């Protein structure tokens, strides 16, 4: 912590409520479109370290530059990309979640790309091919440049993340069924952080995948081991259900949070940091979503709206 500037120390006090933070998060991109310089990507490391994983990778370079200007990093963007980002965890292969990784791949260093098989197959078969881009992977079209190593995760099995001191479990999500996404439960010591890629509510997806995820993390909410939950709210409540395309609104988010609350002990959700991701930046969407979430937040969640390049500590 001694390397952080004064502004970062203030963020520590605000976000930790005077408790010792266990995770630091650098949002490299927070929106769900249309600005290609600010798409879903979150660096996560244990507090006190600069060994990050990148949860989704829609935007990299522009977000790293913002973080440098904010004083979070003191090296060049190239050093942050090549040395501080140890691996990628991709929830699903939509362009707004992978474009930064693909575009930056020529300048990147060797590292693992983790994901469930459905996601890695798309990266291998659609993006890292010589028809659409050079194959920087270790599988797929020849010649293979072997910079990225595709590493399959097994659902719910804990996997140690090399060179980070963290581990992860992957949980399948439904994203406009039959298409899929992924939630990543990141562990550091006895603390956890949960990141969800794009997902629709179980009721609309005709799925139990969110419910199964809530069953898995409910005990961590009860024991206060879950330090933050990152989840999308793409549209305001006025968006018709038939036009959500596998996304959430404030009402649908709060319905899912109530399900999680019932699986945790009474009152355990109060002040749980819930980081709202993937807001579609059309018109007045963001302000409208914030207003609706505040009105519907009867669980007294600690709603957090991340900003590109600004440090979060949990």
Image (spheres, rainbow, N blue to C red):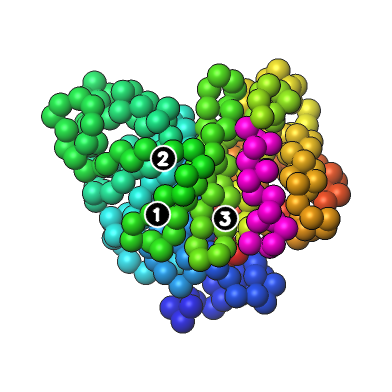
Foreground of the two, 2 or 138:
138
Residue that mark 3 sits on:
193
Residue 34 in percent (x, y) is at 53, 33
Residue at the (16%, 37%) spot, across then down: 145
Above-or-below relation of 103 to 6: above
Give the distance between the C-alpha atoms of the residues marked 1 and 3, in whole angstroms. Answer: 15 Å
> What stretch of residues is rendered in magenta?
209-225
Residue 224 in percent (x, y) is at 68, 62
Q: Is residue 286 left or right of residue 83?
A: right
Can residue 121 be seen here? Answer: yes
User: Which one is earlier in the sequence, the residue at label 2 or at label 3?
Assistant: 2
Q: Quick check: marks 2 and 3 in contact, CB under 8 Å?
A: no
Please tell me whether mark 3 sits on a helix, a strand or a loop. strand
- The verdict on residue 78 being magenta is no
- The verdict on residue 212 being magenta is yes
Above-or-below relation of 14 to 187: below
Residue that mark 2 sits on:
153
Q: Residues within 10 Å of mark 1 (few under 14, many from 20)?
A: some
Q: Is residue 58 left or right of residue 162?
A: right
Residue that mark 1 sits on:
160
Residue at the (28%, 49%) spot, across then down: 111
């Amino acid at each position: 912590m001694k390397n952080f500037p004064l502004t970062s120390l203030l963020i520590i006090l605000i976000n930790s409520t005077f408790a010792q933070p266990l995770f630091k998060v650098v949002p490299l991109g927070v929106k769900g479109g249309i600005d290609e310089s600010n798409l879903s990507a979150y660096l996560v490391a244990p507090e006190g370290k600069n060994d990050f994983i990148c949860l989704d990778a829609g935007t990299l370079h522009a977000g790293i530059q913002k973080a440098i200007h904010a004083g979070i990093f003191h090296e060049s963007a190239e050093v942050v990309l090549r040395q501080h980002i140890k691996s990628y965890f991709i929830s699903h292969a939509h362009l707004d979640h992978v474009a930064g990784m693909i575009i930056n791949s020529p300048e990147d260093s060797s590292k693992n790309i983790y994901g469930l098989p459905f996601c890695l197959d798309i990266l291998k078969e659609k993006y890292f091919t010589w028809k659409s881009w050079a194959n920087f992977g270790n599988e797929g079209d020849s010649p293979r440049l072997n910079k990225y190593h595709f590493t399959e995760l097994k659902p719910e099995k804990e996997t140690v993340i090399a060179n980070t001191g963290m581990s992860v479990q992957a949980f399948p999500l439904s994203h406009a069924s039959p298409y899929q996404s992924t939630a990543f439960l990141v562990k550091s010591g006895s603390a956890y952080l949960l990141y969800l890629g794009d997902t629709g509510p179980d009721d609309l997806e005709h799925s139990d995948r969110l419910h199964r995820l809530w069953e898995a993390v409910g005990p961590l909410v009860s024991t206060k081991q879950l330090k933050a939950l990152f989840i999308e709210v793409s549209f305001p409540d006025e968006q018709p259900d038939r036009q959500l395309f596998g996304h959430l609104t404030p009402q649908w988010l709060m319905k899912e949070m109530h399900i999680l609350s019932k699986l945790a002990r009474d009152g355990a959700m109060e002040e749980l940091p819930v980081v709202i991701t993937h807001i579609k930046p059309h018109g007045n969407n963001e302000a409208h979503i914030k207003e609706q979430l505040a009105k519907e937040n009867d669980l007294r969640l600690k709603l957090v709206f991340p900003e590109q390049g600004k440090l979060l500590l949990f």
